């Protein structure tokens, strides 16, 4: 099947989309005003949804400290299995996000996982916990790739990383906010004949359901149909996007773009990079309350132990904001991702080599800052570098799916049988995953930089005819959009 006539026009003008861009035109004062308006309508609600998503998936760690495992007679391995089932469902139900209207899709997902979160507070046995955790993973799976894709059709490439970082900062804020909320809700122990940990799930789930109903009226649709923009503003937005990438065009679905994603080694690189970081992200976020409880604060009440999770997560949120600002200013990603991984490794080394509560708590702060910051940077990378729209949607879904297989490994390795010496063995494995992520990040950056240089040389030597493969030339002739494989496209590395 060939592309439609409108797509042929887009395909034949690929090169013009990526060169000779008038920066003054797309960064004029009215553009900055337009961006502020877009930010106001996207960032608060979408970041809020992700905060609730991360809160509802990770509050089980606080509930465990507050008595969940004891009351339900759940063993250590059973608890790890319950956590893993969430990610099994999350990986299984991941879908490319450009197939559904975000105004309906994202609030509906939020409503469903909010109901599932409430149900976590009503369970009475191990089977109930297993089933609800699987359902929670299935209903939350579409949010992250959906939001990343929405960002990609509202912002130019250089504008996306900072917005994705703010959005992902909701995860760190969820950790801090979750600790405070769990401390407060834990005081409801005995109210209505329910335990404090049950109220953690119920209250936070009710909050999510309430926000989801509001979100139906706030979450925007696609940029070309955005009702919060006037007609001149919408035209201006689409013109800015078309001058930068494919984001402003209406692209029909074709399997050609799906195959492009699966055949692209760079797309697999983004997925493997997240695989390395997902191991530490979710093992740390889900087991942080348990790790802190084992640091020598056993005499503290459970709610006070939970409060100790707040400072590391608050530091992580601050680290994300500062690091991503510098990364955006420098228009570089890999060096900052590698730097974040090194900071996290320092944290895990401290956790492995020390035994005093104070030193261990310092290690937790380093680990949290590095892990969350690295994830905030890497999760925006394919949204900046992958084009066309369908290929980008598939690439983001692949990154989350393959990455979260690392999360499954993480939650299974941090188990009671490996908790000796303050989880020394799992911490060492976490370092191994971070080293793997560093290798992938450096490899990706090296290839992207060399490819940019190769394309610059082809342009300077005017050898465009020799640049494209026969398969690419055939695709261009059929009207398909080559996107990031176009000669004039340049990667961010």
Image (tube, rainbow, N blue to C red):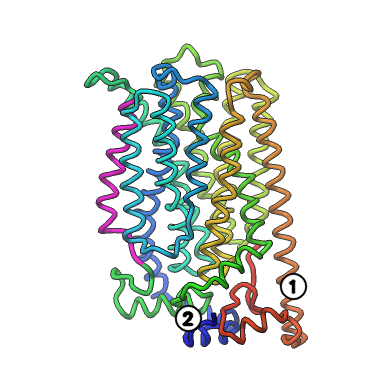
Picture quarter containing residue 150?
A: bottom left
Using residue 127 as the reference point, say whether residue 202 is left or right of it. Answer: left
Residue 60 is a magenta residue: no
Q: Residue at point 43% right, 68% down?
A: 154
Image: magenta residue range: 198-221
Of the 4 image quadrants, the one containing the N terminus is bottom right
- Along the line of sight, which residue is nearer the eye, 147 or 181? 147
Kind of element beneath mark 1: helix
Residue 418: x %, y % from top left = 64, 22
Which residue lies most toward the top here? 299
Q: Which residue is mark 2?
A: 25
Residue 226: x %, y % from top left = 33, 70
Q: Which residue is mark 1?
A: 453
* Measured Cα–Cα span from mark 1 to mark 2: 27 Å
Instruction: Report the predominant secondary structure element of the magenta stretch.
Output: helix
Kind of element beneath mark 2: helix
- Along the line of sight, which residue is nearer the eye, 489 or 176? 489
Residue 240: x %, y % from top left = 46, 77
Residue 337: x %, y % from top left = 64, 50
Q: Residues within 10 Å of mark 1 (few under 14, many from 20)?
A: few
Q: Residue at point 48% right, 88% down?
A: 5
Camera sees residue 6: yes
The total of numbered circles placed on residues is 2
């Amino acid at each position: 099947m060939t592309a439609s006539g409108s797509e042929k026009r887009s395909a034949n003008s690929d090169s013009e989309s990526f060169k000779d861009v008038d920066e003054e035109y797309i960064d004029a004062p009215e553009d900055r005003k337009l961006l502020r308006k877009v930010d106001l309508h996207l960032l608060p609600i979408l970041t809020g949804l992700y905060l609730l998503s991360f809160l509802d998936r990770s509050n089980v760690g606080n509930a465990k400290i507050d008595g969940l495992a004891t009351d339900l007679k759940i063993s250590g391995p059973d608890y790890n299995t319950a956590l893993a089932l969430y990610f099994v469902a999350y990986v299984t139900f991941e879908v490319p996000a450009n197939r559904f209207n975000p105004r309906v899709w994202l609030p509906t997902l939020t409503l469903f996982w909010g109901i599932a979160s409430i149900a976590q507070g009503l369970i009475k046995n191990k089977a109930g916990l297993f089933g609800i955790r699987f359902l929670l993973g299935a209903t939350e799976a579409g949010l992250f790739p959906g939001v990343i894709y929405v960002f990609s059709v509202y912002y130019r490439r250089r504008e996306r990383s900072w917005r994705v970082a703010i959005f992902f900062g909701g995860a760190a804020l969820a950790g801090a906010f979750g600790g405070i909320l769990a401390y407060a809700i834990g005081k409801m122990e005995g109210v209505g004949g329910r335990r404090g940990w049950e109220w953690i799930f119920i209250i936070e789930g009710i909050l999510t359901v309430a926000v989801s109903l509001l979100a139906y009226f706030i979450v925007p649709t696609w940029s070309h149909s955005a009702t919060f923009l006037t007609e001149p503003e919408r035209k201006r937005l689409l013109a800015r996007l078309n001058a930068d990438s494919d984001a402003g065009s209406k692209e029909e679905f074709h399997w050609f773009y799906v195959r492009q994603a699966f055949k692209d080694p760079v797309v697999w690189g983004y997925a493997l990079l997240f695989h390395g970081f997902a191991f530490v992200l979710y093992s740390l976020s889900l087991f942080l309350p348990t790790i802190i409880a084992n640091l020598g604060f056993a005499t503290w009440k459970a709610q006070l132990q939970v409060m100790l999770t707040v400072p590391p997560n608050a530091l992580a949120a601050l680290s994300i904001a500062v690091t991503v600002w510098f990364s955006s200013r420098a228009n570089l990603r890999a060096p900052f991702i590698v730097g974040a991984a090194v900071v996290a490794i320092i944290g895990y080394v401290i956790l492995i080599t020390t035994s005093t509560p104070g030193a261990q708590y310092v290690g937790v702060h380093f680990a949290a800052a590095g892990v969350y910051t690295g994830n905030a940077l890497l999760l925006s990378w394919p949204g900046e570098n992958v084009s066309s729209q369908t290929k980008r949607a598939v690439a983001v879904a692949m990154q989350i799916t393959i990455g979260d297989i690392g999360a499954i490994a993480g939650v299974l390795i941090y188990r009671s049988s490996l908790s000796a010496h303050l989880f020394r063995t799992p911490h060492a494995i976490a370092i191994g995953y971070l080293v793997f992520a560093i290798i992938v990040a450096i490899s990706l950056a090296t290839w992207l930089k060399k490819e940019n240089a190769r394309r610059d040389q082809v342009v300077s030597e005017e050898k465009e005819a020799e640049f494209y493969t026969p398969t690419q030339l055939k695709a261009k002739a059929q009207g398909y959009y080559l996107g990031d494989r176009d000669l004039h496209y340049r990667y961010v590395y």
